[in-house]
Amino acid sequence: MTMIRGKVVGCMTTFPGRFDIIRQTVASIACQLDALLLYVNESTEGLPDLSDLRNVTIFDGQDHAGDLLANGKAYLLKFLQDCEVFTLDDDFIYPPDYVAKNLD
């Protein structure tokens, strides 16, 4: 992954127990960001297809630092420089103005 610079970026972690809601969660916030980085703990098997959300990058924990739990959000920071960063929960549907209100 190349370094992301000067963007509004969200960092989120998830795990298979949240795969039933993760598509809805990601869709609610990804459209408000320049990029959303999603760190997946345990396994990506069964992760819904998010490829239509073009600004979402998935990090398979098995290919990176292993199962980091919520700390996966911090792991993702090493790919960012001079960004506005939102650390996000994987079990919350975000309001359509969440990013704009928080940037204000």
Image (tube, rainbow, N blue to C red):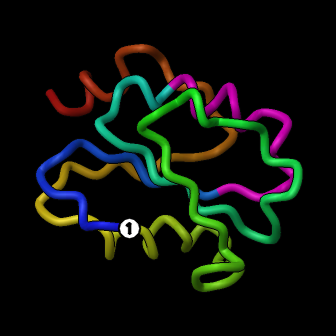
Q: Residues within 10 Å of mark 1 (few under 14, many from 20)?
A: few
- The image quadrant of residue 78 is bottom left
Chief secondary structure of the magenta portion: helix
- The image quadrant of residue 21 is top right
Residue displayed at 20% across by 49% down: 84
Residue 66 among those drawn in magenta: no
User: In the image, what residue type sits under mark 1?
Assistant: Met
Residue displayed at 88% across by 49% down: 46
Placement of the C terminus among the 4 image quadrants: top left
Q: Position of residue 37 (x, y in %)?
A: 46, 53
Residue displayed at 39% across by 47% down: 10
Q: Is residue 4 above or below residue 65?
A: above
Q: Residue furthest bottom?
A: 65
Q: Position of residue 66 (x, y in %)?
A: 68, 83
- The image quadrant of residue 19 is top right
Residue 22 among those drawn in magenta: yes
Placement of the N terminus among the 4 image quadrants: bottom left
Q: Is residue 71 above or below residue 99?
A: below
Q: Position of residue 96 (x, y in %)?
A: 43, 14
> What stretch of residues is rendered in magenta?
14-28
Q: Position of residue 72 (x, y in %)?
A: 55, 70
Nearer to us in this view, 90 or 104: 90
The residue carrying mark 1 is 1
Asked if residue 20 lies left or right of residue 89, the reply is right
Q: Is residue 35 above or below residue 85?
A: above
Q: Secondary structure at mark 1?
A: loop
Q: Is residue 62 above or below residue 101?
A: below
